[in-house]
Amino acid sequence: MIEARGLTKTYGTVRALDGLDLSIPRGGVYGVLGPNGAGKSTLFRILLGLIRPTDGTATIMNGPVGDIAHMRLTGSMIETPRYPPYLTARQVLRWLALEHGIAGTADIPYWLERVGLSEAADRKVRGFSVGMMQRLGVAAALISKPELIILDEPTSGMDPPGIQEMRALIRSLANDDGLTVVLASHQLLEVQRVCDRVAILNKGKLVREGAVSELTAVGERLRLSAGPVDQVLAVLGARGVRDGDAVLADIPRTEGPALIRALVEAGVEISEARWVGTDLEAIFFTETGAVQAPETIHAG
């Protein structure tokens, strides 16, 4: 869906992007992460034809950036959206539909409902919270029924229920509507839950990329809530370590069934056994050297 080769953008002596190579496949949800100044926003603006790269190339759907046919199949929400304050949410979407030339076909009530704004459809946006503006921005990005949608911090300003609803919507867009969703978010746990693949940028370069399931499986161990703990540790020997009231077993998945049988035969009572791996947050800090607390990290 998106290809970047040697993509570079400089502002004076600052390299916002530094020879970036990136391939984003069609379909699914793709996360672009990085600390402040990593180049995420610059990448998005280049892909949307808002700025030009200093060097390198980028394509969308196998066509050049800025190609009208492909841009009509691309929706986006970059940073917090702004709309004329005197318009209602319904009027904003109507206005945008007219600009797109799709006023006769745009299903405005459907998209308002899809993003959870049906009850606020006829309220003026001057009274909208940041979270409500984010929802309206997502609806605006979707109204033309794109094949690709780029979302920058789609859950910004939302409360936990709103974040959960947005996560469900994003997954639904990929799974049910067949869209390719590219998003950035500083909420790393949400990224881990919603994304199929992620790219981690740092100082304009790609430092890690891959399927979330594969990245977080590194260092995977079997966590056993079982007792007595001393008996579990005796069976595991050097491959077991206490984790609170549980035990972490450093074994490959293929040995899991045999270990469970051995523990049962040794008289151990097992209440839970599950595989745990490295979370995306730990990978993010390792790859970027970021030292901020998780709530202050931003993906761009």
Image (tube, rainbow, N blue to C red):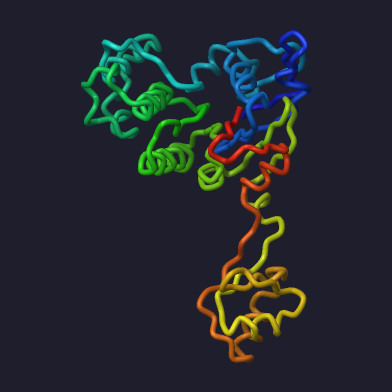
Is residue 59 positioned above or below 265 on the image? above
Q: Nearer the viewer, residue 198 or 162?
A: 162
Q: Is residue 185 above or below residue 274?
A: above
Q: How many marks?
A: 0
At 59% from the left and 12% from the top, the residue drawn is 49
The quadrant of the picture occupied by the N terminus is: top right
Is any part of residue 273 visible from this angle?
yes
Q: Position of residue 201 (x, y in %)?
A: 69, 32
Query: Where residue 286 sits: x, y (%)?
Result: 72, 44
Residue lying at 60% horizontally and 22% vertically, measured from the top left: 41
* Residue 105 pos. (x, y %): 32, 20
Instruction: Report which quarter residue 122 is drawn in.
Output: top left
- Left or right of 178? Residue 41 is right
- The quarter of the picture where residue 155 lies is top left
Say which residue appears at 66% left-offset and 10% top-offset: 52
- Residue at 41% x, 31% y: name it: 157
Could you tell me if residue 75 is visible in this image?
A: no
| Residue 29 image position (x, y, % from top left) | 54, 38
Is residue 102 toward the left or the right of residue 227 in the image?
left
Q: Would you place residue 46 above or below residue 284 in this image? A: above
Quadrant where the C terminus sits is: top right
